[in-house]
Amino acid sequence: MTVTEAIRARRSVHSYDPSRPVSDEQLRELIELSTLAPSSFNLNHWRFIVVRSEQGKRALHEASLNQRHILSASAVLIVLGKIDAHEDVGRFVDDWIGKGYYPDDSHLGKVSSEFYGLNPTVQRDEAIRSTSIMIGMMMLAAKERGIDTAAIIGFRPPEIVEAFDIPDNYMPVMLLTVGHELKPPPERVIRLGYDEIVHVERFDRGRG
Ligand SMILES: Cc1cc2nc3c(=O)[nH]c(=O)nc-3n(C[C@H](O)[C@H](O)[C@H](O)COP(=O)(O)O)c2cc1C
């Protein structure tokens, strides 16, 4: 399956076949592959909690407005974003410099002061943005392997934080259910067409 084919074939699955599990090895491969995704300043903001137990899935189900596909999924990934990932910048900058990307560590100061600095909004945005790009890649890698997924943001974060003992410097960005669909989902829901979403050179407010 090509990337194009995976993009066309991927759908959000809301009902999984419990008789077709996704193995730990398959999950590991998916995580290792999708974390080749780019991230802001290469800070690798992502962390994962793999939930397979009935008890864990029930806790997620309750915190997520009783979305039933959480219970039928083979596994649910709680995808976390590290809010203070900029604190780790030294390690990544050393790697860049060691590999000849940059001649010195001038980026280090920029990350910690000018860009992320003391700005909690940027820190949070970046934890979400970089992690979300990775999740999109994971959905496609899964589809290529015949594995189905669905992203979930309809949850109450404090309940997940408490139930899974998540430290303050991490946020649950998204849940990703993983499994094999029970039956094909209905026809794809609408997408806005090219002419509705593309503006040329500047925003055309007449089409706003
Ligand atoms: C960030 C994000 C969060 C989502 N959260 C939920 C959710 O909480 N519950 C749900 O049923 N679907 C959720 N979805 C799935 C969307 O409803 C779905 O992607 C959309 O309807 C398009 O359908 P498709 O993915 O099958 O193309 C989410 C999708 C994204 C990208």
Image (spheres, rainbow, N blue to C red):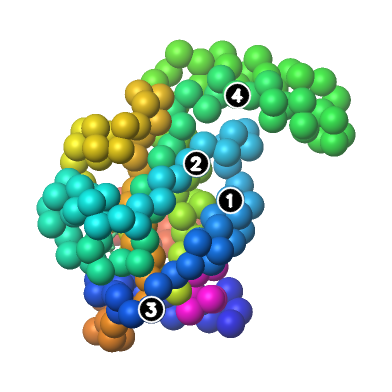
Q: Secondary structure at mark 3?
A: loop
Q: Earlier in the sequence, mark 4 or mark 2?
A: 2
Q: Earlier in the sequence, mark 1 or mark 2?
A: 1
The quadrant holding residue 161 is top left
Which region shows up in magenta? 140-146
Image depth: mark 2 or mark 3 in front: 3
Residue 115 is left or right of residue 75, and the answer is right
Instruction: Report the quarter where the C terminus lies.
Output: bottom left
Identify residue for label 4: 88
Numbered badge on residue 20: 3
Q: CA distance from mark 4 to mark 3?
A: 39 Å
Binning the other alpha carbons within 10 Å of mark 1 as few (below 14), some (14 to 19) or many (20 upward) gives some
Q: Which mark is residue 46?
A: 2
Q: Amino acid at mark 2?
A: Trp
What element does badge 1 sit on? loop
Question: Label 3 CB, ligand 1: below 8 Å?
Answer: no
Q: Quadrant of residue 159?
A: top left
Q: Which badge, 1 or 4, is on the more N-terminal residue?
A: 1
Q: How far is mark 2 from mark 3, CA to CA?
A: 27 Å
Amino acid type indicated by mark 4: Asp
- Name the secondary structure under disc 4: helix
- Residue 109, image x, y percentages: 65, 15
